Structure formats: structure tokens, C-alpha cells
Image: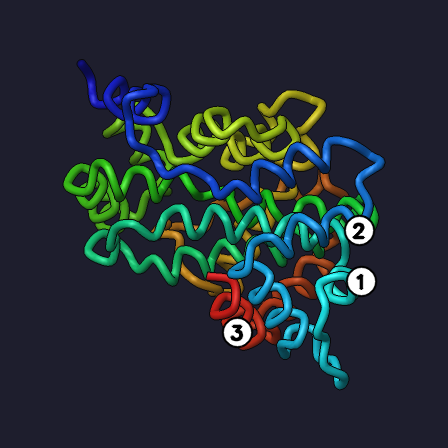
Amino acid sequence: MTIKEKITEVVRSKKTQLPTLPVIVNNIMSATRDERTSAEDLAGFIIKDQAISNKILKLSNSAYYGLMKEVDTIPRAITIIGFNEVVSLTIGMGVLSAFRQKDLHEIFDIRDLWLHALGCATAAKEIAKKTTGSNMAEQIFLTGLLHDTGKVILAEYFPNEYRAVLEDAKESQTPLYRKEKQALGIDHAMLSGLLMERWHFPDNILLPSRFHHNSLECPLTCRHNAMIIEFADFLCQEADIGNGGNPVVKELETVRQQLGIELRDMEEIIEGLKEQRSKIEGFLEVVK
């Protein structure tokens, strides 16, 4: 069996003890497929999970939102944070908690990886605001947050092989996903897609994650979102928010033009990320 087959088997085989998502995540993903799901319904799901309820309240009172008056109820927190963003955060927190079982610091700094993910989510939201509108901006936040989960699978289940790939990419100054494909036959973006497939994530999250290093090849229905995630990843690296293990920033001029992002908009988002760094770090302390 090749290394690619072994990696694929880890995610696809029912025998593999992959982390499972909390019940609240599955319930919310099912509920939000129904357009009739209300903020009251969402609050009802969240209240049943004390840990996530506490984090949502803590987040709504954090410097990230900068309110003067204390928020002490979940319905009020949903009003402050936003329905779609609370959905994204609840699912994201569920995924983060699912991957706490092992210490991955010997492979890479897991805090830096999640900080990069949050930075990418924040950048994706800003790009979406400029290209598709505020409602889509909240929805794409989750994709930015989860796009690199394949790296966690590689580090957790294939630590020796992945450590060698990370070191080789750094020494040769080659984009990490290319070294992964060369050494392992599969890259972390493809693996993120497989993981989301196993977890029954919808295509509008799965496909942009799967194609976030080759967004122009993504199926047309999700290509715009894939381009947003790829460009957000680039901007996050330019702003030096966190570290996803990639030593080289790939230029994305074609993607920028396809998205209709002006150079001044790009610089504005990068500067905004730098200015929000402390808030993003505080955000991570709440949700992780």
C-alpha cells in the first residue's frame, strides 16, 4: 500500500478512530439546511451545550466585538455576533475540540496553525464583503476557519512523514502543498476535502476547502468561494498572522483579478489584519 493509499484509508475507513464531532455540530448542520431555522432555534441548540454556550457568551463580551454592555443570554449573543457567524463558530469550535486528543507541537505549533486559520477566516470575510455581500461573508468565515484541517490529520496520524515534508519544504523554499503532493501523493487541501466528506459537510464548505490551492480548478458552483479562500490564505500570510507551515507565499494575480479585488483593497485588508492581530489572538483564546 502506498503512502497516499494509507493516508486516504485513515480518513475513509470506518475502522479508523477519527475524532467525531460533538452532537451539537451535527444538529446545527442539519438544522441550518432548513431555511425556516430561526435564531431562537439556534439558541435552543447552543444552550444544550454548556461549554459552547459559555464560549459564545465570552466571545460576545470580548474585545473583538467591543461592546460596553455585558451580554448575558445566548439570543442576545446571536444578535451581536450574527446568526451565520454563530453557526460558523459553533461548528468551528466543535472541530477544534475534536482535535485536542494528541499533542502535535512536535510537528508544528498547533496554536499558530489555528491562529492562521482564524486570520484566514477573517480575511475571507472581508474579501466576501467586497465581492459578494455581507450575508455570504458570514457564511464563508467557517470555510476559512476549517480549510487546513488536513494538516492536523497528517501531523496526528503520519508524524514522521509529515515532519520530513515540512522540513523539506522549508529547506527548499517550496510551497508546502507541492511538497506534500510530491512526497505523499496527496496534499492537505485534498485531505481536508476527504475529512469533510466523511463528516457530511455540504459542498459549499467542502469544495472551497478541497480546492484552496488550485481554486481556478474548483467546480463552477463553488469556484468563487474557493478563490476567496485561496486569496485569504495568501493575504493572511502577507500579514504574518499565525503560521500554517507554508514557507513560500504564492502570488495570486490571476485570482485577484478574477475576484475583482483592487490592489488598494488588498493592501487595506492586509493592514486591517495587522491591526486586528491582538483581537484575533484574543478571539482564539476564547474559541479554542
Q: Amino acid at mark 2?
A: Ala
Q: Amino acid at mark 3?
A: Gly
**Label 2 close to label 3 by CB (< 8 Å):** no
When asked about the image quadrant of residue 59, the answer is bottom right
Check disc 1 and report its element: helix, strand or loop.
Answer: helix
**Label 2 close to label 1 by CB (< 8 Å):** yes
Q: For label 2, count other residues whose C-alpha is less than 10 Å away and answer few (under 14), some (14-19) or many (20+).
A: some
Residue lying at the far left in this picture: please name it.
160
Residue pointed to by mark 3: 282
Marks 2 and 3 sit apart, C-alpha to C-alpha, by: 26 Å
Q: Nearer the viewer, residue 6 or 12?
A: 12
The image position of residue 2, as x and y in percent, is 20, 17
Residue at 72% x, 37% y is: 32
Residue pointed to by mark 1: 79
Q: Is residue 166 above or below residue 236?
A: above
Residue at 43% x, 30% y is: 195
Marks 3 and 1 sit apart, C-alpha to C-alpha, by: 21 Å
Residue pointed to by mark 2: 39
Q: Nearer the viewer, residue 120 or 268?
A: 120
Mark 2 or mark 3, whichever is nearer to me: 2
The image position of residue 52, as x and y in percent, is 55, 58
Residue lying at the far top in this picture: please name it.
1
Residue lying at the far bottom in this picture: please name it.
68
Of callouts 3 and 1, which one flags the residue occurring earlier in the amino acid sequence? 1
Of callouts 2 and 3, which one flags the residue occurring earlier in the amino acid sequence? 2
Mark 2 or mark 1, whichever is nearer to me: 2
